[in-house]
């Protein structure tokens, strides 16, 4: 009896994320990230914004998978569309600041496309693995379109993207040629998106999403139109992924069809699975950490690293549903219990 | 004058099998009704058609004077028809309080009204000191009550309870009968209960409808029904 009690009391907090401690952790991370360029310079400061953008992409999936219980392999499709939107807006020079136009357009493109796809699939009752397959097909379609429409997209060769500028109307402008300027432009945007998604999942709307994850039939029987909620969640997720793509296009200054490949689609899922899907911060840090580790280890031992990553992914799916965040939390719960 | 719930000629065919055969049934507002019958009598089919989980092959269902036969599950839940499943169906990883808060969000209304409703529900379902416990740590009987609590927090007007005492101890079963009595008095709820447990049905002191082979065999008080020769034959012969 005693053992049963103690095992439930440790299992219970491990499944649940403590909101207040996550805000604290997020604030500390933000301060550290903001101070980083004062200590470090060169390549890390150049490349970190890219990983932060990946982290944003990971959050778009974390919100969908971790909070609503919908797995999507289509985040790469939205990301790629955003990146091309940035490339084309810059190429065609749309509006007074094509970069701003592309960022706004990417939110619309990702949101509307995801809403349409979500509406048709969810109202037709497409769930679980079938939804996963359709989203995977979505990525493949985007990849094929970007290859076939070569007169616009540059086909296989991809497309160079001019870096956007920050303009402030009569107050002048900031050129984003310097790495530190880019770093300080991307960081607050990522922090804002984190804050926004956190507000969404903590709202009444977010509570219904969690209810759908926990028991969709129960949610329907309580009068929640779950296909509407799932469509809305997918639309928000698509908008964030596409927006992240537009930022990526501007930062990488190059886009190619391989962004929508099955491999990249899978990588996004791996980031979130390893970081931990029940927490947006875990997804964000998972995206940053796994992407940068991948980049580093790929240059040293490409073959073995892919293998290791695959194994870690399987371990996270089979044994550690909460990912690294889940393990950390379980340890923290155990320690606080020992303190008592 | 139309009844609160009025069912006419309700029929459900599954290929060759007729699960419900031209059932006429009506219920006044605030009534408590027990539906009994041997296995395969069509009890669950009957309430599934009222809740919107199954589409009838023929017949009409009117709720508060309105024809709801073609209405979707979600819309029926919104106008106040809520169903409790045979196995407790709650949000397992959420706490009792979170479960109830979520259910209360199902209907529009002020936050303060929702909160006082939740407090009332958590007290009447005897879950007050378990408010912060995740639902999966509760006992089977407590989870059954939590599910009833979800329907209450959701402000259902017509409760469809599919074997609410399944898996309960005899004390819990007795307490559930008390709970359901309190509910219909306190919240002016109309309740249809499917049951097997004969002691529970006696405790309920409510009119009983007996289903057999998809048809209504008889309706009456517990005493009338339990004395009836036909009903005894059905129960002893088939079940």
Image: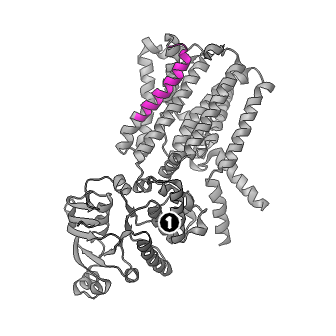
Q: Secondary structure at mark 1?
A: helix
Q: Is residue A17 above or below residue B96?
A: above
**Residue A328 in magenta stretch:** no
Q: Which residue is mark 1?
A: B146
Kindly identify the residue that appears in the image at 61 percent across and 48 percent down.
A322
Residue A253, quarter of the rendered image: top right
Residue B114 versus residue B239: which sits nearer the camera?
B114
Q: Residue A8, relative to residue B180: is it above or below?
A: above
* Magenta range: A95-115
Taking the image as shown, residue A139 lies to the left or right of residue A296, namely: left
Residue A236 appears in the rendering: yes
In the orientation shown, which residue stands out farthest toward the right? A39
The prevailing secondary structure element of the residues shown in magenta is helix
Provide residue A324's location: percent of width, then percent of height: 66, 45
Tell me if residue B143 comes above or below residue A329 in the rendering: below
In what quadrant of the picture does the N terminus of chain A appear? bottom right
Query: On the image, which quarter does residue B48 sit in?
Result: bottom left
The quarter in which the C terminus of chain A is drawn is bottom right
On screen, residue B149 versus residue B229, left or right, reads: right
The percent coordinates of residue A132 (x first, y second) are 45, 40
Say if residue A263 shows up in the picture: no
> Which residue is depicted at the point 77% across and 29% down?
A35
């Amino acid at each position: 009896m005693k053992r049963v009690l103690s095992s439930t009391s440790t299992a219970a907090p491990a499944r649940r994320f403590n909101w207040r401690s996550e805000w604290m952790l997020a604030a500390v991370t933000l301060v550290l990230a903001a101070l980083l360029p004062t200590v470090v310079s060169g390549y890390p400061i150049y490349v970190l914004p890219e990983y932060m953008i990946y982290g944003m992409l990971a959050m778009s999936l974390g919100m969908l998978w971790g909070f609503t219980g919908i797995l999507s392999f289509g985040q790469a499709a939205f990301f790629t569309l955003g990146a091309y939107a940035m490339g084309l807006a810059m190429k065609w020079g749309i509006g007074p600041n094509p970069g701003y136009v592309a960022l706004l357009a990417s939110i619309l493109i990702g949101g509307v496309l995801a809403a349409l796809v979500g509406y048709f699939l969810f109202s037709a009752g497409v769930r679980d693995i079938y939804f996963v397959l359709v989203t995977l097909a979505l990525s493949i379609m985007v990849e094929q379109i970007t290859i076939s429409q070569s007169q616009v997209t540059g086909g296989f060769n991809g497309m160079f993207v001019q870096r956007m500028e920050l303009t402030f109307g009569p107050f002048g402008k900031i050129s984003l040629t310097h790495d530190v300027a880019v770093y300080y432009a991307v960081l607050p945007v990522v922090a804002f998106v984190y804050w926004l998604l956190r507000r969404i999942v903590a709202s009444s709307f977010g509570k219904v999403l969690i209810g759908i994850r926990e028991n969709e039939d129960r949610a329907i029987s309580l009068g929640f139109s779950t296909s509407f909620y799932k469509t809305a969640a997918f639309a928000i997720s698509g908008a964030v992924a596409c927006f992240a793509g537009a930022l990526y296009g501007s930062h990488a200054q190059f886009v190619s069809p391989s962004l929508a490949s099955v491999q990249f689609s899978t990588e996004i899922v791996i980031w979130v699975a390893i970081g931990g899907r029940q927490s947006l911060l875990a997804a964000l840090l998972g995206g940053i950490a796994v992407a940068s580790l991948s980049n580093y280890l790929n240059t040293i031992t490409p073959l073995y690293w892919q293998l290791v990553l695959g194994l870690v992914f399987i371990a996270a799916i089979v044994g550690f549903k909460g990912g690294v965040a889940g393990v950390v939390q379980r340890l923290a719960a155990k320690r606080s219990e020992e303190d008592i | 004058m139309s009844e609160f719930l009025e069912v006419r000629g309700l029929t459900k065919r599954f290929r060759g099998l007729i699960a419900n055969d031209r059932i006429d049934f009506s219920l006044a507002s605030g009534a408590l009704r027990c539906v009994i019958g041997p296995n395969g009598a069509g009890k669950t089919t009957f309430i599934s058609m009222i809740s919107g989980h199954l589409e009838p092959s023929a017949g009409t269902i009117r709720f508060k004077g309105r024809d709801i036969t073609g209405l979707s599950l979600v819309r029926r839940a919104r106008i106040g028809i809520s169903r409790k499943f045979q196995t407790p169906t709650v949000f397992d990883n959420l706490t009792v309080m979170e479960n109830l808060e979520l259910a209360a969000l199902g209907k529009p209304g002020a936050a303060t009204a929702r909160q006082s409703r939740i407090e009332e529900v958590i007290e009447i379902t005897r879950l007050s000191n378990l408010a912060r416990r995740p639902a999966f740590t509760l006992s089977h009987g407590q989870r059954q009550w939590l599910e009833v609590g979800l329907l209450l927090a959701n402000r259902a007007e017509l409760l469809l309870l599919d074997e609410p005492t399944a898996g309960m101890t005899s004390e819990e079963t007795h307490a559930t009968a008390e709970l359901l009595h309190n509910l219909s008095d306190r919240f002016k709820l109309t309740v249809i209960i499917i049951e097997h447990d004969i002691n529970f049905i006696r405790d309920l002191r409510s009119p009983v409808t007996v289903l057999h082979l998809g048809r209504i065999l008889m309706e009456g008080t517990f005493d009338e029904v339990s004395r009836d020769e036909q009903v005894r034959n059905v129960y002893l012969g088939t079940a």
